[in-house]
């Protein structure tokens, strides 16, 4: 049915997952840093975080991807020419991961900021009053509750991130979308292979939703559901 391209699609799917996982790590780090900056008392930190989230949400993902890969490579090599460096060829995997992580870091910033604000301030104050350090308050009191509040937003952004990895195909990375397009062109059966690609993405998102549903149940142990 897939004319011998099944293995190629599986290899592309593995690369897609690798891009998504690495991008998630970067996005979480940036999101946490951005949330801390937005909640800080420093006007400079709050301003920088606001510019970051506003800029990222205003510019299309594809534009940022092309800007980082092609524009970044041109800028780096222009600087390297002046400094006497050898030509630098940016790896598409690195460019894709950094760009997607940078993009979703802005969305994670707002998710984590909202989750922190959802935890009553009195609980943090009570922890400090009982002699807990700020680190203990964060890891034992605020952190677990933050995760429960942030989980819906994190799960939604993760699902969007998986699908957004398809844009790395435009910079030459042989991900699932790229391999599907190659197979469709070689066999002249675009419907078959793009449908196969869609099914794989559907499988990724379905498994992710099942995992987040399980995690939500685990984090909700000991809490009482409030009837509306």
Image (tube, helix red, strand yellow):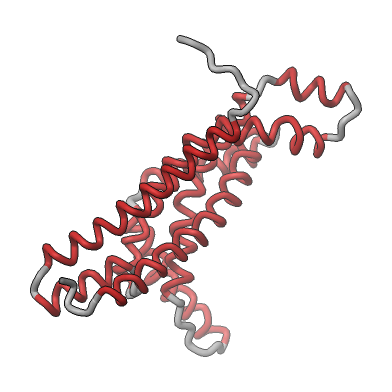
Q: Is residue 185 above or below residue 202?
A: below
The residue drawn where x is 60% and y is 51% is: 29
Answer left or right for 192 relative to 100: left
The spot of residue 32 in percent (x, y) is 61, 44
Residue 210 visible, this angle:
yes
Give residue 47's quadrant in the image: top right
Q: Nearer the viewer, residue 21 or 6?
A: 6
- The extreme front residue here reads 1
Q: Position of residue 171 (x, y in %)?
A: 33, 71
Number of labelled discs? 0
In the image, 105 versus 9, the foreground residue is 9
- State left or right for residue 47 relative to residue 93: right
Q: Residue at x 57, y 84 (%)?
A: 83
Spot the residue most to the left. Answer: 188
Image quarter hosting the N terminus: bottom left
Point 51% across, 43% down: residue: 108
Give the side of residue 158 with respect to residue 118, left or right: left
Q: Quick check: 80 above or below 191?
A: below
Q: Vertically, is 41 above or below 84?
A: above
Name the spot of residue 221 as percent of width and height, x first: 62, 28
Work out which residue is located at the far right of the displayed protein and give it.
131
| Residue 180 percent coordinates (x, y) | 23, 69
Q: Quadrant of the C terminus?
A: top left
Which image quarter: residue 137? top right
* Residue for point 74% across, 30% down: 141
Residue 55 makes an appearance in the image: no
């Amino acid at each position: 049915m897939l004319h011998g391209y099944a293995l190629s699609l599986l290899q592309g799917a593995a690369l897609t997952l690798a891009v998504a996982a690495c991008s998630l790590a970067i996005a979480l780090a940036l999101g946490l840093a951005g949330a801390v900056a937005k909640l800080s008392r420093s006007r400079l930190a709050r301003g920088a975080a606001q510019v970051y989230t506003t800029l990222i949400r205003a510019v299309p993902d594809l534009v940022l991807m092309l800007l980082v890969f092609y524009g970044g490579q041109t800028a780096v090599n222009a600087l390297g020419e002046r400094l006497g460096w050898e030509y630098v060829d940016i790896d598409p995997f690195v460019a894709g991961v950094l760009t997607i992580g940078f993009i979703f870091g802005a969305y994670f910033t707002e998710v984590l900021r909202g989750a922190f604000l959802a935890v009553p301030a009195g609980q943090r104050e009570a922890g400090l009053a009982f002699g807990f350090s700020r680190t203990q308050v964060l890891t034992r009191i605020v952190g677990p509750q933050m995760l429960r509040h942030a989980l819906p937003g994190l799960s939604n952004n993760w699902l969007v991130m998986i699908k957004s990895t398809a844009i790395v195909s435009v910079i030459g990375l042989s991900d699932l979308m790229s391999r599907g397009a190659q197979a469709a062109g070689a066999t002249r059966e675009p419907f078959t292979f793009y449908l196969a690609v869609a099914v794989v993405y559907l499988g990724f998102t379905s498994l992710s939703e099942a995992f987040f549903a399980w995690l939500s149940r685990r984090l909700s142990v000991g809490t009482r559901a409030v009837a509306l």
